[in-house]
Image (cartoon, rainbow, N blue to C red):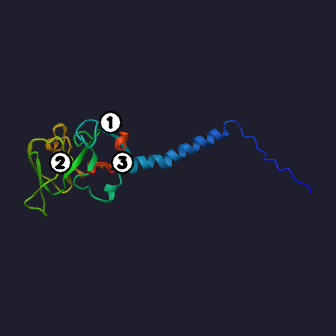
Amino acid sequence: MQTENFNEKVLPTKKGEGLIKDVITIVLLVIFVVIPIRVFIAQPFVVFGESMSPTFENGDYLIIDQVSYKFNTPQRQQVIIFKYPNDTTKFFIKRIIGLPNETVEITGPDVFIKNSEHPKGFKLEENYIVNNGNNNVVKKLGENEYFVMGDNRNASSDSRIWGSLEKSFIIGKTFLQLLPIKKIGILPDKF
């Protein structure tokens, strides 16, 4: 009985040919996968400042969901990222307090909401607040306007100061927290 010797042969390639293919593959992946995800679906965001403390602290690293609000409307008490209306090169992070066509009334540390469902108003329960503000504000919101505030009321520049937020300025909502490691989680703004 005769056995055949099957030796595998490797064909030589030109020096650097494999590297060029790898680089082209990576570039194509970035162009067709990474960039569209980054631009249209999710975006990283680093918290700067103390206006959302204790929910989010200075330096926290978040991933923002940019798709949800294309199909759903923003909801009360969700934390959102938006372009600051007075300087659209800056991004702010705040919590939605008032929804379109509502009246927000702040008396001292208490927030009251009046709408068609509650014409006499109701007191907003905000168990995520540690540092209450002490303001007196009444604001009637228009069709596409939101009232937003930071969780650290004494250190927040928000709708109490610069007015309502148009929906068109909203970028997305918090979806994932990656840093600090002890706070990693999905939907980190839940209370």
Mark 2 neighbour density, 10 Å: few (under 14) some (14–19) many (20 or more): many
For mark 1, what is the residue?
59
Quarter of the view holding residue 90: top left
Label 1, secondary structure: give it. loop
- Confirm or deny contact between disc 3 and disc 1 (CB under 8 A): no
First along the sequence among labels 3 and 1: 1
The residue type indicated by label 1 comes to: Gly
Camera-side residue of 118 and 85: 118
Residue at 27% x, 58% y is 73
Q: Is 2 left, or right, of 19 in this rendering? A: right
The residue type indicated by label 3 comes to: Gly
For mark 2, what is the residue?
164
Label 3, secondary structure: give it. strand
Tell me where residue 34 appears, x and y as whole percent.
47, 47
Tell me where residue 134 appears, x and y as whole percent.
10, 41
Tell me where residue 141 appears, x and y as whole percent.
15, 53
For mark 3, what is the residue?
185
Camera-side residue of 124 and 65: 124
Mark 3 neighbour density, 10 Å: few (under 14) some (14–19) many (20 or more): some
Label 2, secondary structure: give it. loop
Report the mark closest to the observer, 2 or 1.
1
Residue at 9% x, 42% y is 135
Relative to 1, residue 19 above or below: above
Mark 3–mark 2 distance (CA, rounded to whole Å): 30 Å
Check residue 110 in the rendering and tell me which mark sits there, or answer none. Answer: none
The residue type indicated by label 2 comes to: Ser
Camera-side residue of 127 and 73: 127
Mark 1 neighbour density, 10 Å: few (under 14) some (14–19) many (20 or more): some
Mark 3–mark 1 distance (CA, rounded to whole Å): 16 Å
